[in-house]
Image (tube, grey):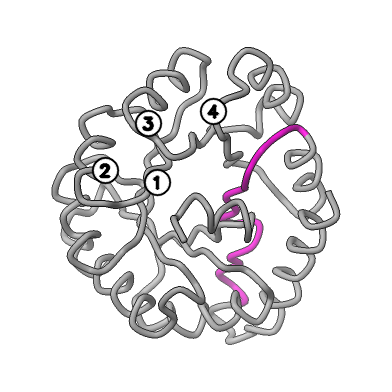
Amino acid sequence: MTSLEYVKQRKIVAIVRGLAPEYMVRLGHAFEEGGIGLMEVTYNQSAPDTWKDTAKAIEAVEKEFGDRLLVGAGTVITPEQVSLTYNAGGHYLVTPTTQPEIIRMGKALGLGLFPGAFSATEILTAWEAGADAVKVFPVSCVGPSYIKAIRGPLSHIPLMAVGGVNEKNAADFMKAGCVGLGVGGNLVNKEWIKNGEWEKITVLAKEFMKAVNEA
């Protein structure tokens, strides 16, 4: 099954930022128990010294879960991050911007590509460069109506909504035509993680899955 097929089937990508590698596997179990099947571990562009730790976290999740919780990298903007992700066993790349050279590099390595874009021009550019689906980001300032409008002329391009998606509006984005959604802080509550309240994350994950599956 390709990364895009996973997204279409499982619908939610959990976005994890700024967590130490030792939390990742336990967090992955909380996601899995809640029905979430994809996990995006992001690079911190302002701290290059942490990139290898990010790759180690990706590797740890891949070894623990395999295709039960498909792991990839987020906030990818450099060739080094592409290579680190590939070598760590990551399955896909999610970028914040449309960089055709990064898309082509990732595709050449057999990775799934979900580049970020906002305007119709950027979305088409990302698609023509080889994207599997295009991440519309940030959707918090435009809402589901924007997805619906973009889907008019660009109905052939699979879209994902990221940035401000929560359990209350998730269904609306799916109904507007998204194939999947990326969810970060509205699911990955760092206070719960710090306190070891994994069951709260599982319960919230179930709410997200119920919303998208009933859309």
**Residue found 37% across the figure and 22% down from its top:** 128
* Image location of residue 105, percent across then percent down: 19, 40
Query: For the residue carrying disc 4, how many other residues have a C-alpha within 10 Å: few (<14), some (14-19), or many (20+)?
Result: many
Relative to 191, is 106 on the left or the right? left
Task: Please tell me whether residue 118 is drawn above or below residue 29 in the rendered image.
Answer: above
Of the numbered discs in the image, which one, if any, rests on residue 94? Answer: 1
- Residue 78 pos. (x, y %): 19, 42
Mark 3 vs mark 4, CA separation in Å: 16 Å
Q: What are the residue bounds of the magenta stretch?
A: 176-192
Q: Distance from label 2 to label 3 (Cα)?
A: 16 Å
**173 left or right, relative to 163:** right
First in residue order: circle 2 vs circle 4: 2
Amino acid type, residue under disc 4 in the picture: Ile
Residue matched to label 2: 107
- Residue beneath the point at 30% across and 45% down: 76
Residue at image point 57% right, 42% down:
162
Amino acid type, mark 1:
Val
Whichever of callouts 1 and 2 sits on the residue coming sooner in the sequence is 1
Q: Secondary structure at mark 1?
A: strand
Label 4, label 1: how many angstroms apart (C-alpha)? 16 Å
Disc 3 vs disc 4: which is toward the camera? 4
Q: Is residue 81 magenta?
A: no
Q: Residues within 10 Å of mark 1 (few under 14, many from 20)?
A: many
Q: CA separation, marks 1 and 3?
A: 9 Å
Q: Secondary structure at mark 3?
A: loop
The residue that label 3 is drawn on is: 97
Residues under numbered marks 3 and 4 in contact, where contact means CB atoms less than 8 Å apart? no
Residue that numbered label 4 is attached to: 157
In this rendering, is residue 51 above or below 28?
Answer: above
Which numbered disc, 4 or 1, marks the residue that appears first in the sequence? 1
